[in-house]
Image (tube, rainbow, N blue to C red):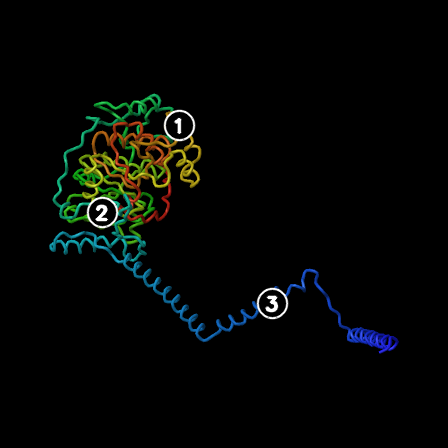
Amino acid sequence: MSLSSSSSVSRLQASQSSAYSLDSENNRRSLGCSVSVRDDVDFDDDDRWGKKRKKKKRGMVLAGVLDSPAMRRMRKLRLHIVALGILLVIVVFEVRHLSQDRPTSTIRDTDAKGKEEADSLNEASSTIIRDVERPKNLDNMDMPMRKVGGKEEACLKLLPPEDLDKIELPEASFSGVRILSYVHNNIDSKESKVQDSSMASAFGGYQTMDERAKTFELRDTMVVHCGFCEEGSGFDIDSTDKSFMESCIIVVVTCTFGGGDDLYQPIGMTRLSISRVCYVAFWDEVTLEAQAKEGKAPDPMSRKVGLWRIVIVRNLPFSDQRRNGKIPKLLNHRLFPRARYSIWVDSKSQFRRDPIGVLEALLWKPKVPFAISEHGGRSCVYKEGDAIVQKHKALPGEVSIQLNMYRSEGIPERALFHGHKALAEASVIVREHTPLTNLFMCLWFNEVMRFTARDQLSFPYVLLRVHAMQVNMFPVCTRRALVNSIGHKSKAKPLNIK
């Protein structure tokens, strides 16, 4: 082919190519199509786009598998298993609830002959809870456990019933005080005429600060203020009840003033303990009226509600019902002059152990005359004061006066007594009535009269001042083993005393 022919062919191909390009451009314009390109997409990255296609394909395959009949059956099975588990939990909860609400025998029988007596006492004790809603933990006899050295053990170790029935009272404990007597008719003191009557009364004896200081100096023979200081100063009990109280050697004590709480029957004792132990509940006339309206008045002949002998107190000395309640709590050695042992139980609790077994476990075995529950939440008396104020259980001013006094007398932030914290919970008190423990309770009562009625604030102070005391500060779990905590029903109203 000649050069001119080649040149012609080339021009023809170029002309066709140009015409094809022009037609393509015209076609795009006529169709109105536009293409936008993102700057962040790398069209040259074939692997990335390939991976996306593979993921999409795998997702479609997985969706198909999950929607298969086998997977649907598996999901239904799993739902059935979950529903069955929930149903099982509900059944277990109901069974435990019913078992706790079932009445527990009041007496742990030691022989077949006691069954009839146990039934009659159960019937008597049930009168206080008839036709009213029962607290969930009432009559619960379960023993709480704790871990010691990696092993679980009971929070309270009691002797078996057959051993408790045979036990004899031990000899009286040695006391650093031999003779203790009480102030009477001290109203002529000069300082008493100017002392604020809201801080003391004729019942408390108007103790001066100098007299207070001397009571902490232990001597062989001591005379102290300890309530009942004036004739006609209050807390009047009739002669029949006084005669009964003078017969008690071992006594379990509680009280409800102002109609604030119900009375919970003690449980867990042996038959022999019932014949050896007095159960005494102090009521005022307000409580008597409130309980009578609910059909729970004492029997006219026995003066009992269940196992509790009800002692009606008239002419209460203080408008503050908390202070009135401290009289049977702290001064039961004055009320039961022949008693050798006492167990105090707050009205918010149900006592649930054998009293003689408790004395053996908490006093006789450790060889101490006094046992009380240590505080479960705090160890500092000053922080306890802050908590009392925050809960509106005492006025800030009176708490401040008391704790400033204790701080000035050297009570530390974290007071310890023989390695244990000195702050007590004080809802259960177990003690032998020795001259020293009686003195201790008198001093504690005087602090409650002088300062706030919150006795947990004054307990560490008195304990650290009376160095000769031997005390078993038992842990919280032991207290829980001793009582079923029900809680206060309502707040007692103050009395209108002029």
Residue 232 x %, y % = 28, 33
Residue 483 x %, y % = 27, 46
Distance between mark 2 and mark 1 Cα atoms: 39 Å
Relative to residue 338, is residue 224 drawn left or right? right
Q: Nearer the viewer, mark 3 or mark 2?
A: 3
> Viewer-proximal residue, 292 or 30?
30
Relative to residue 67, is residue 435 drawn left or right? left
**Which mark is on residue 50?**
3
Distance between mark 3 and mark 1 Cα atoms: 81 Å
Quick one: SS at disc 1? helix
User: Can the viewer see residue 151 in this picture?
Assistant: yes
Amino acid at the residue labelled 2: Arg
In the displayed structure, 47 sits above or below 354; it is below
- In the rendered image, the quadrant that contains the N terminus is bottom right
- Write down the quadrant of residue 213 in the picture: top left
Q: Nearer the viewer, mark 3 or mark 1?
A: 3
Is the residue marked by circle 3 packed among few (<14), some (14-19), or many (20+) residues within 10 Å? Answer: few
> Viewer-proximal residue, 473 or 342?
473
User: Can the viewer see residue 203 in this picture?
Assistant: no
Residue 303 x %, y % = 21, 47
Amino acid at the residue labelled 3: Gly
The residue carrying mark 2 is 353
- Write down the quadrant of residue 243 in the picture: top left
Amino acid at the residue labelled 1: Arg
Is the Cβ of the residue at disc 3 closer than 8 Å to that at disc 2?
no
